[in-house]
C-alpha cells in the first residue's frame, strides 16, 4: 500500500500536472491498439476522448467492381474499456508539451472519513521548487454527516479530522519527500523516474513491500506519480502499465467527489479508483476504498499518514507556475 510520507527536512510536494486536452487524432491510435468489443455504449456522443474512439473504430469495406449493389459498409460501434481509456490518456500525455515555471503548483480538495458516517472536506494549495515554497491557508472546510447519530458521535469525540487552521506561509530550505512503498522520493527524484517501461516496472517492483498485491500497489502508486512533476513520458508509461492489468472496471457515468462527470477506472481489488475527464483525458480524482491502514514506525524526522477507507482527492489545479503575488 502507499505511504503518504512527508519529511520535515527533505520535501517533495509531489503533486500533479493533470492530463491536458489533446486533439482527437492523438487518441485514435490508442484505441486502435487492441480494440475490445464487449457491449455497445451510449456515451459515444461526448467530445474529445469519446469522439476519438468513435473515429478509430470505423471500418470500411474494400473496393469492388461487381455489378450488383455492394453490401452496406459495416460500421462497428466502439466500446470503451478501462484499457482503452488508459491507452488514450498515454497517447495524450506523450504529445503534451512540458509545462514551464519555477514552482510545482497543486490545489487539491481532500475528503476524509474520521468516523463512520462522517466526511470532512477541505482545500489546500502548495507551490514548491524542491527546497523553497509556499503553503496556502486551508479553505472551504466542510463536514457532512449521514445522520444525527453520526454527528453526535463526532462532536462527542472532539470533532476528529478537522484540519488545522492557519494563514498562508512561505518556507525556505525545506526538502519534502513522499513515500511510495519502500522508497522515499524528493521532487528531484520524481523528475528522474524512468520513462522506459521495463525500467519503470523494475522500479515499482523494488518499491513494492513484500507480500503486497502488485496490481493494487501499482494503482496506489499511480496517484502519486500521476499527480507529480514526473515527465509526461514517464506518466504515459505508467498508464500503459496500468492498462495491462487484469480485472479493471470502467464506469462511464461516474462523478468525482466534487460532482464533476468522468470515467472511473477501478482496480481488481476494488480499493483504488481513478476518475478521468472523458473530454480531455485529465485525471480528476483518486479514491481509496480499502481497509484502514495501521500506523507503522518510521525513521526519525518523518511521519506516515495511513490510508483510510473513504479518503479521496479531487485535483483542482496542478502544474508548473510562479509564486502568486
Image (cartoon, grey):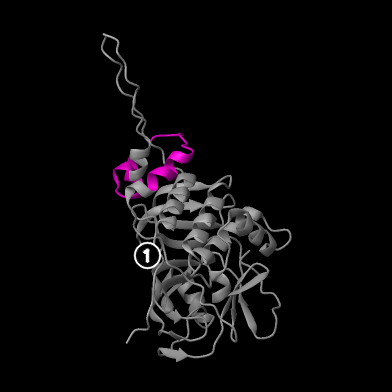
Residue 308 vertical placement versus 101 (above, below) = above
Graded by Cα atoms within 10 Å as few (under 14), some (14 to 19) or many (20 or more), the crowding at tag 1 reads some
Placement of 14 over or under 269, stated as above or below = below
Residue 206: x %, y % from top left? 69, 62
Vertical position of residue 77 compared to residue 89: above or below: above
Residue at image mark 1: 258
Judge whether residue 41 can be spotted in this image: no
User: Across the whole image, how many numbered discs are drawn on residues?
Assistant: 1
Extreme residue in the top direction: 67
Q: Nearer the viewer, residue 174 or 255?
A: 174
The range drawn in magenta is 27-51
Q: Quadrant of residue 272?
A: bottom right
Q: Quadrant of the C terminus?
A: bottom left
- Can see residue 97? yes
- Residue 40: x and y, percent? 39, 35
Magenta stretch: residue 46 in it?
Answer: yes
Between 316 and 133, the one lying in front of the other is: 133
Residue positioned 48% across, 57% down in the render: 274
Label 1 element class: loop
Which residue is pictured at 61% across the width and 59% down the height? 200
Query: Residue 208 location, x and y as percent?
Result: 67, 62
Q: Can you give x and y, in whole percent of width and height, for residue 51 in the image? A: 32, 44
Residue 11 lies left or right of residue 100; in this view the side is: right
Residue 151 falls inside the magenta stretch? no
Amino acid at each position: 500500500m502507499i505511504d503518504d510520507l512527508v519529511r520535515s527536512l527533505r520535501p517533495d510536494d509531489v503533486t500533479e500536472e493533470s492530463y491536458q486536452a489533446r486533439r482527437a487524432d492523438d487518441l485514435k491510435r490508442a484505441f486502435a491498439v487492441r480494440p475490445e468489443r464487449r457491449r455497445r455504449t451510449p456515451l459515444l456522443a461526448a467530445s474529445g476522448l469519446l469522439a476519438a474512439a468513435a473515429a478509430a473504430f470505423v471500418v470500411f469495406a474494400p473496393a469492388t467492381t461487381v455489378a450488383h449493389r455492394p453490401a452496406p459498409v459495416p460500421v462497428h460501434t466502439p466500446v470503451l474499456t478501462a484499457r482503452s481509456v488508459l491507452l488514450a490518456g498515454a497517447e495524450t500525455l506523450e504529445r503534451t508539451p512540458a509545462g514551464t515555471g519555477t514552482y510545482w503548483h497543486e490545489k487539491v480538495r481532500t475528503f476524509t472519513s474520521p468516523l463512520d458516517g462522517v466526511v470532512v472536506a477541505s482545500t489546500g494549495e502548495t507551490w514548491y521548487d524542491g527546497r523553497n515554497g509556499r503553503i496556502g491557508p486551508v479553505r472551504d472546510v466542510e463536514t457532512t454527516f449521514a445522520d444525527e447519530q453520526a454527528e453526535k458521535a463526532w462532536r462527542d469525540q472532539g470533532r476528529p479530522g478537522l484540519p488545522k487552521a492557519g494563514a498562508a506561509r512561505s518556507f525556505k530550505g525545506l526538502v519534502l519527500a513522499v513515500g511510495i512503498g519502500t522508497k522515499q522520493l524528493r521532487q528531484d527524484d520524481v523528475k528522474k523516474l524512468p520513462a522506459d517501461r521495463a525500467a519503470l516496472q523494475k522500479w515499482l517492483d523494488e518499491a513494492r513491500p513484500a507480500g503486497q498485491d502488485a496490481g493494487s500497489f501499482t494503482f496506489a502508486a499511480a496517484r502519486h506519480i500521476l499527480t507529480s512533476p514526473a515527465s509526461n513520458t514517464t506518466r504515459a508509461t505508467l498508464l500503459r502499465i496500468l492498462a495491462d492489468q487484469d480485472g479493471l472496471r470502467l464506469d462511464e457515468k461516474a462523478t468525482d467527489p466534487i460532482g464533476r462527470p468522468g470515467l472511473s477506472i477501478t482496480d481488481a481489488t476494488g480499493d483504488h479508483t481513478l476518475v478521468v475527464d472523458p473530454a480531455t483525458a485529465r485525471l480528476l480524482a483518486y479514491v481509496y476504498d480499502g481497509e484502514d491502514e495501521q500506523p507503522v514506525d518510521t525513521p526519525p524526522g518523518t511521519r506516515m499518514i495511513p490510508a483510510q477507507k473513504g479518503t479521496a482527492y479531487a485535483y483542482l489545479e496542478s502544474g508548473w507556475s510562479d509564486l502568486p503575488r
